[in-house]
Amino acid sequence: MQTYSIAAQDVAQVVGTIPTDWNLKAKMQFLGYASVADAVAERFHCTRGLLDRLNPGANMAILKDGDVLNVPAIEKPKNIRGSRLQIHLGQKVIRLLDAEGKVAALFHCSIARDEAKRPSGSARVVGVTSNPAYSFDPAMWPEVHNVTQKLLIPPGPRNPVGVCWIALSLSGYGIHGTPAPEMIGKTGSHGCFRLTNWDATRLGGMVEAGMSVEFVK
């Protein structure tokens, strides 16, 4: 554990409650955090629930610049470069393998709810984009009934694909961050592979265009 003094940059990323309506999301300039506590939790790779339990005496609703909280001690990540990726659908994990086939890194992910949308065989990494905007296509979201045209959803940590998009050679598929880190490890996506924002950012720095991706059932 360690203590952390809330910084101005944490406060600057707060935009308040994010609307659920996609038309309203598209009108925003930035999809940031609903609260300072949410920003701090993500900075230190934990859920809001854990942050609350670590700070029972703090009023998490009115945190401000300079307030001090107990947080997990996060180690600076090592500089790791991989040779290929394996996405294990049954285990819901992504493994980065080195040139000798040894596991260099492992990340828990979420996969498609619909088994028919879970890919098989292999693909390759096409590229990595930080802080991406998201193209909302209503044809891909049949549960949404009030959107009649494609929308461009602004970037930010609460963007549907989070703060990092790793494009795959399969059309419409990628590995990306999430606006809801507590949901990682479940079968809830529309087809892509979700990671926490911090894991998506780390993996994005470990891969490069052309890297092979194997889907393991």
Image (cartoon, rainbow, N blue to C red):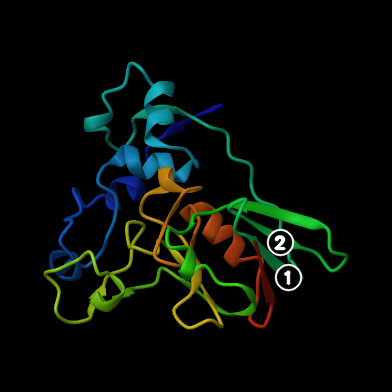
Amino acid type of the residue that numbered disc 1 sits on in the rendered structure? Arg
Work out which quarter of the rendered image holds the C terminus and state it.
Answer: bottom right
Dot 1 crowding, Cα within 10 Å, few <14, some 14–19, many 20+: many
Residue 165: tell me if it is visible.
no
Asked whether, in this view, residue 103 is left or right of residue 47, the answer is right
Asked whether, in this view, residue 160 is left or right of residue 187, the answer is left
Rendering coords of residue 189 (x, y %): 41, 60
Q: Residue at point 28% right, 29% down?
A: 60
In the picture, the disc for residue 96 is: 2
Rendering coords of residue 204 (x, y %): 58, 66
Q: What element carries label 1?
A: strand
Rendering coords of residue 182 (x, y %): 42, 43
CB contact under 8 Å: marks 1 and 2? yes
Identify residue for label 1.
84
Residue 126: name its quadrant: bottom right
Viewer-closest of 110 and 70:
110
